[in-house]
Image (cartoon, helix red, strand yellow):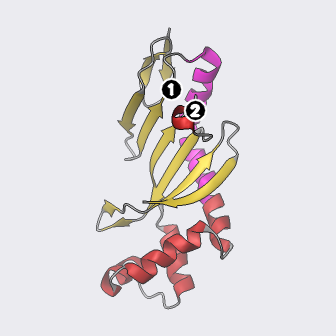
Amino acid sequence: MQHPLPHFGEINREQLEEYYSITTTAGINLDLNFEHTRIDADNAAMLAEWLRDIDQLDVKNKAALQQDFETSEGETQKYFRFYIEELPEEQLADLVGEAETDEEKAAILLSKLQLCRVGFYPDGKYGTTSYAVFDYTIYIDGEPEDQLLVVNRDAQRELIDITWES
């Protein structure tokens, strides 16, 4: 049975491939990861809803990242501290301008965070409890950095956690 999915077009939900990948017009990489070769109509419809709602989920994720940033023990603070400490001064100045304190620099870097990938795991491929994994990074000289802030959400769209990965 063919099922339409935003960004991906029609997929055969009775003969799924293990992996699908596409880049949106906004430059976000999307991938679908399936453990099984079939998905029922309800789960396919839920996946389609998630794909339609990426922009809304991005806003929700950025609010979660902001909240994590405001707690000094959060992964978001550690992520930006890494850039403040490791980037050459000139490169950091290109990103944060005239900001003087580390707190100001981190806040500016937070505002520059961009969604670069969303991975979907509708049937728990790789044993994950995340339904969707949103990867965020900053861009330096037009290129995405390999250090990622990752927002993990369950099938009910609830935040599981925020992690820092490379």
Within-10-Å neighbours for mark 2: few <14, some 14–19, many 20+:
some
> Is 43 included in the stretch rendered in magenta?
yes
Q: What residue did someone put label 2 on?
A: 124
Name the spot of residue 130 as percent of width and height, x first.
60, 41
Residue at 51% across, 70% down: 79
In the rendered structure, are the residues bearing label 1 and label 2 in contact, judged by CB atoms less than 8 Å apart? yes
Residue nearer the viewer, 98 or 75:
75
Q: Secondary structure at mark 2?
A: loop
- Looking at the image, the residue that sits furthest to the front is 127
Gap in angstroms between the C-alphas marked 1 and 2 = 7 Å
Q: Amino acid at mark 2?
A: Gly
The disc placed on residue 35 is 1
Residue segment shown in magenta? 39-62
**Residue at position x 43%, y 18% in the image:** 10
Amino acid on which the number 1 mark rests in the picture: Glu
* Closer to us: 118 or 9: 118
- Residue at 45% over, 81% down: 84
Image: 142 above or below 33? below
Callout 1: 10 Å neighbours few (<14), some, many (20+)? some
Q: Nearer the viewer, residue 86 or 51?
A: 86
Looking at the picture, how far across and down is residue 148, in whole percent? 46, 59
Q: Position of residue 154 (x, y in %)?
A: 66, 41
